[in-house]
Image: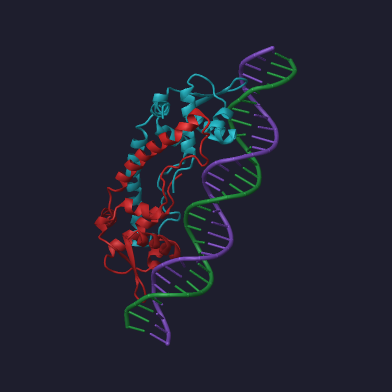
Chain colours: A red, B cyan, C purple, D green
Amino acid sequence: MSTSTRFAVAIHILTSLTLREGQAVRSEDIAHSVNTNPTVVRRILGALASAGLTQAQLGVGGGALLARPAGQITLLDIYRAVEEPPYFALHRVPPNPACHIGNRITPVLEQEFARLSRDLELSLGQTTMADIASRVEERRGA
Amino acid sequence: MSTSTRFAVAIHILTSLTLREGQAVRSEDIAHSVNTNPTVVRRILGALASAGLTQAQLGVGGGALLARPAGQITLLDIYRAVEEPPYFALHRVPPNPACHIGNRITPVLEQEFARLSRDLELSLGQTTMADIASRVEERRGA
DNA sequence: CTATGTGTAACAGAGTCTGTTACACTGTTG
DNA sequence: CAACAGTGTAACAGACTCTGTTACACATAG
């Protein structure tokens, strides 16, 4: 299975905010760019705000703003804000404890999945929204 | 979102085959250890066999066997056999091409997700079924 | 006070995942 | 060659998740 589309949409939303840094952007305008419903955008913005990545400006002329510089928002921050852990699922029903293998496989899987998760998080932490936004800008000529 | 439980179950199944290397193991016995239905095991074994990781022995006394040494089966082989790509999903509906950002975000996401996928696959490729099986064996005392 | 825009709940349709039943097929064994 | 053990696979159900949509309470600028 893969991630939900929320991760990609969240990056898209934050790119919009980064490229208009300082201005409050309406969920409706973002939704127009993403090609979806404003409520979908607001739902994701809610998760990003809970994680401290964005903040809302209510009232007339309101919208969403970055809560900290784009260079200090990594893909790991975004992933954690919009996707549920874990990265790798264990058995739905625990294995048979009466079996020699069923008895011992879970901690081995947990250890291995922890290693994979650490590696993935290192990888996610390497890119910031400043990187993404500047790559989008660089495609002006393309 | 996380992987389906198929990845964990597939590793469990292959651990059973590794620890009984050479003997055909019935789906019913594996299912007993996994705590699920034999058909679930056979479905996953089918995917593993299509990927060339296991083979079936039909008829009386039949069951599943490793198709190659456990040291030559990596978690990446297993992941690819039982999970659908991609690791990271793009937008469900493509972004608005009339928008400056919607226009350019997709190739940037594709490039970044390709980097993440490469890193993840490197990580998945580092562990073999021989490693997993020996860790399970080492837990004899625990 | 009014208009604009957010926050959030609730629901529907589509899709996926696991478990289950059912049954055709293969090949060993007597 | 006949019986049987066991696989391969289709089909379906229930649970869950995801996205899109409607609806409406709330905040705040002007």
Q: Position of residue A83 (x, y in %)?
A: 41, 52
- Residue B76, placed above or below residue A61: above
Taking the spot 30% from the left edge, 44% from the top edge, the residue there is A122
Is residue B96 something one can see in this rendering? Answer: no
* Residue B78 visible at all: yes
Q: Residue at x 54, y 29 (%)?
A: B30
| Rendered location of residue B20, percent (x, y) | 49, 22
* Residue drawn where x is 52% and y is 19% of the image: B23
Residue at the farthest front position = B141
Quadrant placement of the C terminus of chain A:
bottom left
Q: Does residue B88 sit above or below B141 in this rendering?
A: below
Question: In the displayed structure, would residue B10 be above or below residue B102?
Answer: above
Q: Position of residue D8 (x, y in %)?
A: 58, 30
Percent of width and height locating residue B122:
33, 36
Determine the residue positioned at 36% across, 52% down: A80
User: Where B8 sits versus B135, above or below?
Assistant: below
**Numbered marks: total:** 0
Q: Nearer the viewer, residue A46 or A20?
A: A46
Indicate left or right for A63 with A134 as reference. Answer: right
Most foreground residue, A93 or A37: A93
Locate residue D3: give its quadrant. Answer: top right
A106 or A120, which lies in front?
A: A106
